[in-house]
Amino acid sequence: MLLLCFLLVTTSGCNKREETKSEASTGSAQTNRITAPKAKFNSKSLGYTNWWLEWNKLWYLQPRWYGSEDECLEAAREVLKSDLYKSQVPLHLYHTHESLATFFKDSRPDYWTEPQVWPDIKACFERYFELNGDDVSWRHNYVMCAWRCRQWKALDEQIGKLTWVRHEYFGGREAFDQMKEKAHAMATKDQ
């Protein structure tokens, strides 16, 4: 899949640029050739929007591969802002955070409570439900993210919006009930 992304980048004309004399003498052209495709590569440059292409771009930009945390989050936030994307595309930002949390699990075990995470999570799920209001299947993931991020008020609100509960996703009925009680107690306490 990464090869497909690379081929699309190199054949779409997104990375063509001329090397200036100053770049040739300083060696900065090599750096620009590597970073330029990352900055410009997106399905819109090919004239269409594509869920898998955007997803693979975000995967490519992750620190475990050829990018950085900042690059992949910036790209995911850009996708979220676009009106071109529907369906599950707004959830790319959520999936990116899931992947980064897994990648950083040893060095940053409290990743979910870092200040940049919750605003992204909230924004992507709110956008998703705005576009796909009748699809409640992702509400479980939003609830779990609010739990991980310790956003008690949001957690309490989102639990109330669950139309059905897949208890095993939360560790069983007892674990879910404890989560629900804690969310309500903490949300009430914060008021």
Image (cartoon, rainbow, N blue to C red):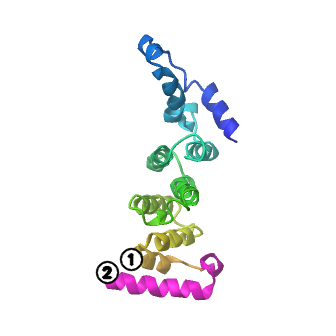
Q: Amino acid at mark 1?
A: Lys
- The magenta stretch is 166-189
Residue underneath mark 2: 190
Residue 146: x and y in percent read 46, 71
Q: Which mark is residue 84?
A: none
Is the residue 76 above or below the residue 160 in the image? above
Residue 46: x and y in percent read 58, 32
Q: Residue at x 62, y 42 (%)?
A: 53
Looking at this view, name the residue that lies furthest to the left.
Answer: 191
Asked if the residue under mark 2 is in contact with the one under mark 1, i.e. CB atoms within 8 Å, the reply is yes
Question: Would residue 1 appear left or right of 125 to someone viewing this image?
Answer: right
Q: Residue at x 43, y 58 (%)?
A: 120
Q: Is residue 91 magenta?
A: no
Is the residue 183 above or below the residue 146 in the image? below
Residue 130: x and y in percent read 46, 61
Residue 190: x and y in percent read 31, 80
Q: Secondary structure at mark 1?
A: helix
- Distance from disc 1 to disc 2, alpha carbons, whole Å, reads 8 Å
